[in-house]
Image (cartoon, grey):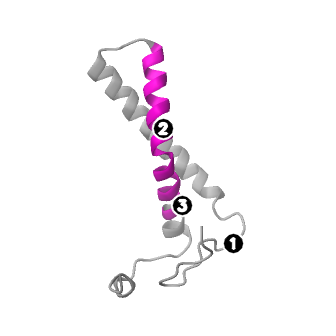
Amino acid sequence: MPVSCPVCDQTYEPEPGFYFGAMYISFAFSTGIMLVVGLLVYNLLGDPDTWVYVTAVALVSLLLTPLSLRYSRTLMLYLFGGTRYDPKYAAGR
């Protein structure tokens, strides 16, 4: 990951250890993903064996881990890092 944004020069790590808080956001994302997948498996497959739940939740969680990581870090920057969207930088792309 680069040190800063090449377009607006926003630093991606405002201070050492800044992203420890993103772990809590990522945990919330993972919990939500597991609940949704578990409910979908229950409703669509009619309460199958436990191994089906474990397999489905593990597979979907592994596939969505990169998105969860990126969005948790993005939310951490937006909520606590003072980062805001500025359309003048988006117009150059």
Does residue 61 show up magenta in the picture? yes
Please state which amino acid type lies under the numbered disc 1: Glu
- Name the residue tied to disc 3: 73
Spatial CA distance of label 2 from label 3 is: 17 Å
Q: Which residue is mark 1?
A: 15
The region drawn magenta spans: 50-74
> Between residues 37 and 6, which one lies in front from this camera angle?
6
Extreme residue in the top direction: 49
Q: Position of residue 67 (x, y in %)?
A: 46, 52
**Dot 2 alpha-carbon crowd within 10 angstroms: few under 14, some 14 to 19, many 20 or more:** some
* Residue 15, x across and y down, in percent: 69, 72
Q: Quadrant of residue 92?
A: bottom left
Q: Position of residue 79 (x, y in %)?
A: 50, 67
Image quarter of the N terminus: bottom right
Q: CA distance from mark 1 to mark 3?
A: 13 Å
Label 2 sits on a secondary structure element that is helix
Residue at 40% across, 27% down = 38
Residue 15 as seen in the image, left or right of residue 61: right
Q: Give the foreground label among 2 and 1.
A: 2
Q: Is residue 5 above or below residue 56?
A: below
- For the image shown, how many numbered marks are present on the structure? 3
Amino acid type assigned to the residue bearing label 3 in the image: Arg
Q: In this rendering, is residue 61 above or below 76?
A: above
Quick check: is 67 in the magenta stretch? Answer: yes
Q: Main secondary structure of the magenta part?
A: helix
